[in-house]
């Protein structure tokens, strides 16, 4: 889809059904392959079907056009002569942030820079403009948001994981398609792969702790970590951790596990060795869910026995699943996870089989973030001490699960797209 700045674009499925409206600030990152895009200037009324006015967060890691979405002024882009149509339920407004990890602020929990009560912000702005807030939905990638907050105000909240659909669509467009990823290009030779693009706090902590406790075995991990990205380094990760501890002492590192002096020494030493590269790192031309990225890391996945996934976020009550996990599923690599509590349980709800027969996955239930991360980190250290044959034996034990998950990911993508389409149609 080619979008035109400041143009109103409507989406329409072929044949009978409903109509909806697209965003104005960039190409959609998810797939509406069953829909036909039609540019129109006015909603098609008196047709009884509901039009969907759709604004979404789109951007790359360098520039996120977020301001209008997150302060509610995006609603000011709606033509005033459409207000009656919105208030009479002829148009429904969707504000989508599901491409990124933005979610609501949770009480008694650590929150961070991508936390905002957008439903409340949109409700206040809608009232100022004379719009019915119940005709607005916040579509978020935070899978906890709908459960916690859907009824707290008139603006609706809908949670959706977008990345099943996004990744599978990219794979299908890849030269060779699904079968390219279904077949390994080499035998398993190495211990583990661990991708870290953005130097976030939990990623800096994970890599620095492994660097500290594993010694020379640390270099058995095929890891990527930038020396600097967008002005941030692993030293900034230390600062972020310190700030989280100061702001959320009751909810973050509640057992005071972190040895701050030792962590600082590890991060400074590690900084002198960075960057570590595996995949494409040019954010001017590439992004973390692109064809170029997938192709550049396939061989490293194929030759790695295990994967250590560091998800986009790993703190607090938010639950966000991204391409970070999907890549391990795509490359049939058993994974341990530095992520939010309950992420493995959520994957099971999608029919993804996890690896409790070769890993201790009780970490998924640990409330304290640092304790949960350390549980995974110590397992990685223990696994690294095993012989290559023992790694291979563990992989063979989960081969059926890896095959199942590969195909299940594509099934889930189709199912989730159908669920999403059905939800849009019933608005």
Image (tube, grey):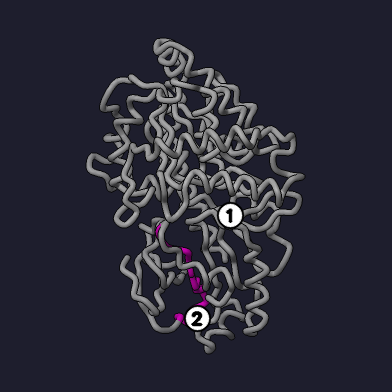
Of 336 and 122, which appears nearest the observer?
336
Tell me if I can see residue 407 in this picture. no
Q: Tell me the distance, in whole angstroms, between the alpha carbons under discs 2 and 1.
A: 24 Å
Q: Quadrant of the N terminus?
A: bottom left
Q: Where in the figure is residue 133, as x and y percent of width and height? A: 65, 74
Q: Furthest-left residue in view? A: 175
Q: Residue 328 lies in what quarter of the image?
A: top left
Is residue 96 part of the magenta span, yes or no?
A: no
Of 285 and 165, which appears nearest the observer?
285
Question: Which residue appears at 39% of the width and 79% of the height?
Answer: 6
Of 409 and 16, which appears nearest the observer?
409
Range shown magenta: 43-60
Helix, strand or loop: magenta stretch: loop
Tell me if I can see residue 158 in this picture. yes
Instruction: For label 1, count other residues whose C-alpha is less than 10 Å away and answer few (under 14), some (14-19) or many (20+).
Output: many
Mark closest to the chain's N terminus, 2 or 1: 2
Q: Residue 255 lies in what quarter of the image?
A: top right
Q: Secondary structure at mark 1?
A: strand
Question: Which residue appears at 72% of the width and 35% of the height?
Answer: 256
Q: Where in the figure is residue 187, as x and y percent of width and height? A: 30, 20
Per the image, the residue denoted by label 1 is: 159
Q: Where in the figure is residue 91, as x and y percent of width and height? A: 54, 76
Question: Which residue appears at 56% of the width and 41% of the height?
Answer: 202
Per the image, the residue denoted by label 2 is: 77
Q: Secondary structure at mark 2?
A: helix
Location of residue 185 with respect to 343 vertically, above or below: above
Location of residue 403 with respect to 411 vertically, above or below: above
Question: Which residue appears at 40% of the width and 33% of the height?
Answer: 223
Is residue 55 part of the magenta span, yes or no?
A: yes
Instruction: For label 2, count other residues whose C-alpha is less than 10 Å away and answer few (under 14), some (14-19) or many (20+).
Output: few
Q: Where in the figure is residue 215, as x and y percent of width and height? A: 48, 22
């Amino acid at each position: 889809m080619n979008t035109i700045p400041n143009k109103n674009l409507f989406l329409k499925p072929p044949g009978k059904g409903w109509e909806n409206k697209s965003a104005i600030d960039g190409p959609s990152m998810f797939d509406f392959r069953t829909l036909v895009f039609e540019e129109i200037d006015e909603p098609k009324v008196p047709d009884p079907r509901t039009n969907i006015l759709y604004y979404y967060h789109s951007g790359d890691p360098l520039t996120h056009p977020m301001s209008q979405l997150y302060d509610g002024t995006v609603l000011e882009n709606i033509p005033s002569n459409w207000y009656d149509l919105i208030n009479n339920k002829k148009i429904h407004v969707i504000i989508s942030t599901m491409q990124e990890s933005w979610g609501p602020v949770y009480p008694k929990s650590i929150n961070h820079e991508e936390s905002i009560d957008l439903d409340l912000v949109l409700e206040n702005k809608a009232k100022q403009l004379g719009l019915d807030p119940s005709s607005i939905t916040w579509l978020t990638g935070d899978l906890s948001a709908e459960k916690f907050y859907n009824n707290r105000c008139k603006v609706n909240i809908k949670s959706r994981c977008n990345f099943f659909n996004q990744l599978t669509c990219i794979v299908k467009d890849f030269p060779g398609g699904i079968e390219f990823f279904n077949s390994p290009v080499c035998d398993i030779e190495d211990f583990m792969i661990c991708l870290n693009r953005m130097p976030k706090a939990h990623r800096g902590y994970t890599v620095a702790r492994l660097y500290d406790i594993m010694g020379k075995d640390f270099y058995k991990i095929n890891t990527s970590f930038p020396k600097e990205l967008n002005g941030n380094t692993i030293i900034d990760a230390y600062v972020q951790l310190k700030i989280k501890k100061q702001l959320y002492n009751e909810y973050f590192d509640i057992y005071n596990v972190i040895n701050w002096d030792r962590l600082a020494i590890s991060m400074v030493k590690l900084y002198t060795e960075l960057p570590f590269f595996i995949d494409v790192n040019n954010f001017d031309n590439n992004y973390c869910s692109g064809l170029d990225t997938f192709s550049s890391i396939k061989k490293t996945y194929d030759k790695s026995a295990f994967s250590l996934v560091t998800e986009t976020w790993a703190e607090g009550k938010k639950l966000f699943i991204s391409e970070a996990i999907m890549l391990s599923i795509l490359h049939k690599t058993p994974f341990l996870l530095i992520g939010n509590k309950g992420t493995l349980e959520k994957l099971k709800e999608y029919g993804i089989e996890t690896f409790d027969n070769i890993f201790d996955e009780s970490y998924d239930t640990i409330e304290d973030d640092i304790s949960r991360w350390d549980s995974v980190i110590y397992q990685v250290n223990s696994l690294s001490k095993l012989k290559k044959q023992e790694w291979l034996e563990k992989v063979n034990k989960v081969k059926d699960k890896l095959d199942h998950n590969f195909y299940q990911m594509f099934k889930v993508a189709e199912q989730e797209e159908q669920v999403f389409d059905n939800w849009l149609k019933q608005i």
